[in-house]
Image: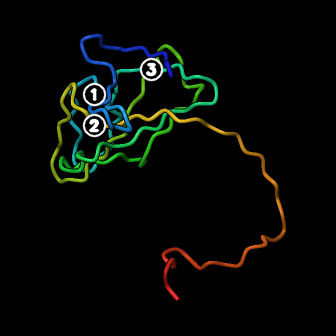
Amino acid sequence: MKITIKRFDQNLPLPQYKTSGAAALDLATRVEMKIPAHQTKLVPLNFALKLPQDYFALISVRSSLHRKGLMMANGVGIGDEDYCGDGDEYRAALHNLTDQPVVVERGERIAQLIILKRDRIEWQEVDQLSSKNRGGFGSTGRK
């Protein structure tokens, strides 16, 4: 699949798969940014996308980011098909869990990108479902 992409800083690489078996493309920061203790900052990721119809971008944190004391504040990010303007740079909302400022370096890989197909749903509302209750959260395998 071909995706139209705009880089804001041509001196940084495009998002890329780091291994032949990688499911996601690594995303790097466009600028160095200091994230104060217990605060959240939007870190620019150096690209805007024009996605094909019925596709969306899913952005998740790289598994190593926790070692810096950082996490994505919103868990995952969703880039909708219509988030496609010339200035619509993707960003990662990083939250600093530590008691000290954390610096994210320019070009540091902090997040991952997967492009997925989107299916639109239609609701079929009923008054009652035909399946029996399974239990509450955390009940799988319990009697």
Residue 110 - label: 2
List x then y, in percent, for residue 64. Answer: 23, 46
Could you tell which of marks 1 and 3 lies nearer the N-terminus?
1
List x then y, in percent, for residue 88. Answer: 48, 21
* Label 3 residue SS: strand
Q: Amino acid at mark 3?
A: Ala
Q: How crowded is the residue under tag 3: few (<14 C-alpha within 10 Å), some, or many (20+)? A: many
In the figure, 41 relative to 63: above or below? above
Q: Residue furthest top?
A: 10
List x then y, in percent, for residue 45. Answer: 34, 27
Q: In the picture provided, is 125 more to the left or to the right than 5?
A: right
Could you tell which of marks 2 and 1 lies nearer the N-terminus?
1
Residue 48 - label: 3
Residue nearest the observer in this picture, 35 or 92: 92
Q: Residue visible at 17% across and 43% down?
A: 101
Q: Whole-Å distance between the Cαs marked 1 and 3?
A: 13 Å
Q: How crowded is the residue under tag 2: few (<14 C-alpha within 10 Å), some, or many (20+)? A: many
* Label 2 residue SS: strand
Q: Quadrant of residue 102?
A: top left
Could you tell which of marks 2 and 3 lies nearer the N-terminus?
3
Disc 1 target residue: 29
Total number of numbered labels? 3
Q: How crowded is the residue under tag 1: few (<14 C-alpha within 10 Å), some, or many (20+)? A: many
Q: Residue visible at 22% across and 48% down?
A: 37
* Label 1 residue SS: loop
Tags 2 and 1 in contact by the CB under 8 Å rule? Answer: yes
Residue nearest the observer in this picture, 98 or 134: 134
In the figure, 56 relative to 40: above or below? above
List x then y, in percent, for residue 68. Answer: 18, 46
Q: Residue furthest front?
A: 20
Q: Quadrant of residue 33?
A: top left
Q: Amino acid at mark 1?
A: Thr
